[in-house]
Amino acid sequence: MYDDYFKRVSTLGVKCTENALVASIRDQLLVRFHNGKSVKEYRMSSSKRPPSCKENSLGTPDGLHMVCEKIGDGEPLGMVFKGRKPIGLRYDECSAKEREKNLITTRILRLQGLEEGLNKGEGIDTYDRYVYLHGTNHEENLGVPASSGCLQVSNEDAIELHDWIPVGSHLFVKL
């Protein structure tokens, strides 16, 4: 997987980051790398819809991204976020109707596309589409496509990734 990331950054003339994440939509797997070495694998869920960088598609965007913001430091496991702000309730404290939804929980790594014309620019911009890597209240669905475009991981994994990956690190999404 690192080879795919390395090829993409080389093609774009960008330098690899010391810490990087590679997400495989096909395998529903997220791999954490440090200096090119695989450190850990995480089960994830991408979009229920086909991969897409288009606005309003609800598809997971592919290509090279950067973690541009980390949100939720110090919040309890399962905290629900709306508009990137904690609502003061963990998902298990929300109404049954609210818990049916895919909630954004625990931590958020906000993503910014780095490929002009693919995931950066008008109508295709990952940042403007509010695509994140975050925890989920439906951990039972990890390993299969289940989101509305974001990359979802377990709440414990969301904390680990939030604490481990610095802002500016790459996240490469491969099909």
Image (cartoon, rainbow, N blue to C red):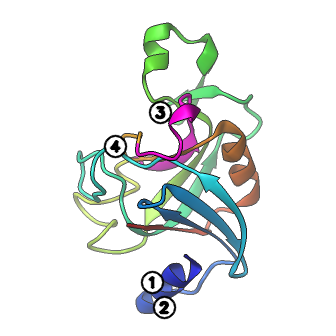
Amino acid identity at mark 4: Lys
Residue at numbered disc 1: 8
Considering only order in the chain, which callout, 4 or 1, is on the residue closer to the N terminus? Answer: 1
Identify the amino acid type marked 2.
Ser
* Residue 3 image position (x, y, % from top left): 54, 84
Q: Earlier in the sequence, mark 4 or mark 3?
A: 4
Asked if the residues shown at circle 1 and circle 3 are in contact, with their CB atoms under 8 angstroms apart, the answer is no
Per the image, the residue denoted by label 4 is 48
**Label 2, label 1: how far apart the Cα atoms are:** 5 Å
Which element carries disc 3, helix, strand or loop?
loop
Disc 3: which residue: 83
The residues bearing labels 2 and 3 have C-alpha atoms spaced at a distance of 35 Å
Q: Is residue 162 above or below residue 2?
A: above
Q: Position of residue 31 (x, y in %)?
A: 62, 64
Question: Which callout, 4 or 3, points to the residue nearer the camera?
Answer: 4
132 vs 41, nearest the viewer: 41
Amino acid type, mark 3: Gly
Cα–Cα gap, marks 2 and 4: 30 Å
Q: Is residue 160 left or right of residue 90?
A: right
Q: Which mark is residue 10?
A: 2
Which residues fall within the magenta stretch? 130-145
Judge whether 79 appears above or below 16 on screen.
above
Mark toward the start of the polypeptide (2 vs 3): 2
Crowd tier of the residue under label 1, counting other residues whose Cα lies within 10 Å: few below 14, some 14–19, many 20 or above: some
